[in-house]
Amino acid sequence: MSRTDVGSPPLRTRRSVGGGGWRYPLVVSAILSLVGPLVWFGGYVGGLGAESTPLPGYVSRQPQRAPGFRVQRLGGGTLTLSDQAGTPIVLNLWASWCIPCREEMPAIERTALRHPDVRFIGVAVQDIESASEAFATETGVSFDLGIDDGSVIDAYPTVGLPTTWFIDRNGMIVGQRFGEMTEAELTDRVEKLLGG
């Protein structure tokens, strides 16, 4: 995985007239904090057959084998995605700092509770464990949650968060959804996944 690191600008040593020398570094740091994630997410365009940066929405795919992974499970233990033949999977990539992720999580939880024959997995990417655990507690999520060590985002590249991957009962990726989903849309996708 490649990542563009954006360093902090050096602080000015000479103060401006009026004592405002501290403003310049703060303004530049604020700009970099906004631009940095865009550069970072841009590094994940591609992989798994993607040829261009998709707009938010659902993208059907030619079926392709879902890569396996093993990550730390929030709350302890490990969370594994391996050969799950016979079990459809909804894989949601999220982060505690992602507002749309927080807004869609209750819809994912309700959909998961209504579809026990589908395995729902959420993986926090570019996050810290304590923040991810707080997020899980605040949103009341009961399905499997893990925290990425970099291997998941490498295997399941995205241009932003949240991103949801749909894996059929044969272990094949059949679609992905960039951006926040409504409960109605997610339910429709899950029912199609079950019917496939």
Image: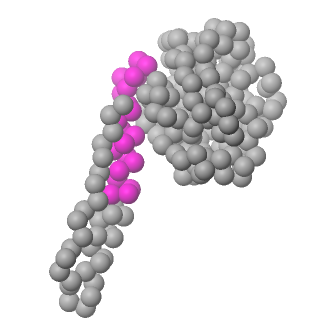
**Residue at horizontal 66%, vertical 52%?**
134
**Residue at horizontal 30%, vertical 42%?**
4
The quadrant holding residue 26 is: bottom left
Locate residue 72 relative to residue 186 in the image: left or right. Answer: left
Q: Quadrant of the N terminus?
A: top left
Q: Residue furthest bottom?
A: 18
In this figure, which colouring scheme has been used for the structure?
one colour
Residue 4 colored magenta? no
Q: Is residue 138 above or below residue 69?
A: below
The quadrant holding residue 112 is: top right
Locate residue 18 relative to residue 136 in the image: left or right. Answer: left
State the image coordinates of residue 38 (x, y, percent, origin top left). Answer: 37, 46
The quadrant holding residue 73 is: top right
Q: Quadrant of the C terminus?
A: top right
**Residue at horizontal 72%, vertical 30%?**
187
Locate residue 91 relative to residue 37 in the image: left or right. Answer: right
The number of numbered discs placed on residues in the rendered structure image is 0
Q: Is residue 20 above or below residue 173?
A: below
Residue range highlighted in magenta:
32-53
